[in-house]
Amino acid sequence: MTSELADVALERMDGFVVATVAGEIDMSNAVRVRERIAGFVTPEDWAVVMDLSELTFIDSAGLYGVSVLAELLEERRQRLLLCVPPSGSIARTVEIVGLHSVSIHADRDLALAAVRADQPTSRPYPPED
Amino acid sequence: MTQSCGVTTFAPIDDLERLKRLQRVSDAALALLSVEDLLDELLLRVRDILGTDTAAVLLLDTEKNELVARAAKGIEEEVERGVRIPVGKGFAGRIAAERHPVALTTVDHTTVLNPILFQKGIRSLLGVPLIAHGDVVGVLHIGTTTPRVFQPDEVELLQLVADRVALALQVRLVQSTRVVIDAFQRTFLPDSLPYIPGLRVTTKYLPASSDVGIGGDWFDSFLLPSNDLVLAIGDVAGHGLRAASLMGKMRNALRAYALSGGTASGIAEYLDRYHRHFGDGELVTLLVGVLTNDLSTFRFVLAGHCPPLVLSETGAAFPTISEHVPPLGVNRSRAFIEHELQIDRGSMLLLYTDGLVERRGESLDVGLERLRRTAERSLRRHDAPEAIATLLEEQLEGRPSADDVALLLLQRQAVPPELEFAVPARASSLVDIRRAVGRWLDDIGVPAVTVGEIVTAVSEASANAIEHAYGPAGGSISIAGDSKDDVVEMRVRDTGRWRGNSRAGRGDGLRVIRGLMDEVTVESTDQGTAVRMRRKARS
């Protein structure tokens, strides 16, 4: 039996979290992946960037996990951004399922730029740039 | 030593008396006793029959070449103190080394190694070897506290008793060792091999025919998280439980290193280091290799082990091994060399231990060439288990092998024009399904973009079946595919009853399938559900 289908790398940038998921997400590990990311996010983070550019497979169960995460974050006024390379079966699947309240970007740089552009100005402890 | 006064000699034993006495040690009831009880009972009877004060049995520890006191009457201390006598030394050691009876009429530090004997006041000793199937397995001796000259017919009788004891012991030791060995083998040889569509792995272990033969041959085959397949086969020097337990250690260490590294040379490097640090200097031959998850390439390392045999369209051949690396446990001057083999569809790879090729008084090259020819003949004609049976029969020419034989046959199946397989209905099967379907679509030439989408659709349909069709008891789902005129058709079937959505948000599966495929039908009956999906291979 294979141990982990997906590898989740989590890092905290200034005020947001970048979760890079490599490998595959299906119904066998969707909940685990979601919980790993959700468990890392603190109330101080205002956004999560989920980078799927190294992902080779995701199905509707995996995307359901993504939308649950988005809802969870939304309740806490936190945003979820997704990077999905525009060509390939993952982009197709994301398009068919249709993720609401998630902004989708073609690559990591674009997603990071979007996070920073939207960064709220009235944060309790603004980062020192 | 001159015979002093007061030396007792017993009257010669007549034939009838001999028979009666012998009867007493070959009593059928003894057959039911354990080794310990049997020895105790026999010693009591021997002491009684021959009118002696002491009787003891020492058994040979073949690993250390020492005799170990196992049962004693009148000199129980021998057993309690765990007396060990090297073969060739002292009274018992001499009997084992010379393989014939020895009588002593002087018992002191010049004639015996074990001081208990003279401390207990034993004046005369007679000992005979325990011989079973031509091998010395121990020594039986009797003693008297009064000086006594044992008569030739008493010596003969004791030898007869010893032969019965040796045989009875042998049977019991073989039985009990067999039990342990069986347990060892169950633990150390993998009982189930990974399921990999497109590949078939068949293994065989043949114990050595001689003695209590557990050899040190072992093999292993397991998947890494990357889905690369690790194959290993090796031979630990020596026989018996010691070799078996070393084999177990090597197997476990190999698994651990494989999991943390994943290359053949890395595994061999660390295993060698492990063995030279923790081992006892035993030599261990090893072939360890990693088959890439697309099944195309086998990278392997040889350490004093026979080369693998590749069977392809063009025949059977050994890879060219330019440099030979010694077994693990030997100080090496250079690193392990990783060899690479391409495994084409329809090809086979045979890994084996030297018991399959080696014959006494024959060079290894002759044995290898015989294997190559035999394999070419027998492996191509049959299905795996039958092929292996034929190979073994022809290679060993029907005679039992003196060494044990382990072999592992890997067959990469030729591309089936149609795909069909079944997997257990559980979430962890999904990844296997995707690999198998992806490989098959690749094989029949479907473009990569389309492969990804069809694989996604099949995975969705399978996930639906796994989630909805079966209760906790599970079941299986079958996947089939074929292609006609550039249209690929995939079918996912289960035999369960549709159980309705068990989780919110899972209605998306069918939507994804419909979105990715050109034509989708879902048929649900009492017999189960079949999802049929069609898609143009090139759009």
Image (cartoon, coloured by chain):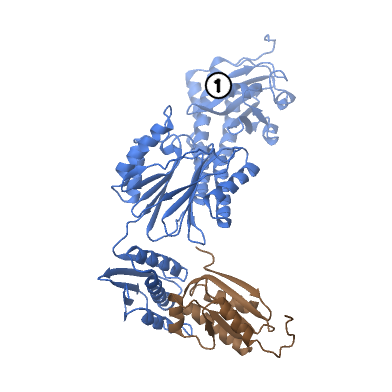
Chain colours: A brown, B blue
User: In the rendering, at what x and y percent does residue B300 appear?
Assistant: 48, 48
x 55%, y 72%: residue: A21
Q: What's the residue type where badge 1 is placed?
A: Arg
User: In the rendering, at what x and y percent does residue B425 appear?
Assistant: 42, 70
x 70%, y 10%: residue: B5
**What residue sits right under mark 1 in the picture?**
B99
Q: Up-down: is A102 above or below B37?
A: below
The residue tagged with tag 1: helix, strand or loop?
Answer: loop
User: In the rendering, at what x and y percent does residue B176 appear?
Assistant: 52, 42
Is B425 displayed left or right of A106 in the figure? left
Query: Which of the two residues, A68 or B102, is positioned nearer the viewer here?
Result: A68
Query: Which of the two residues, B210 or B91, is positioned nearer the viewer here?
Result: B210
Q: Up-down: is B346 above or below B211?
A: below
- Assign the C terminus of chain B to one quadrant of the image: bottom left
Q: Up-down: is A89 above or below A3?
A: below
Q: Up-down: is B103 above or below B229?
A: above
User: In the rendering, at what x and y percent does residue A44 appear?
Assistant: 69, 83
Whether residue B205 is visible to the viewer of this picture, yes or no, is: no
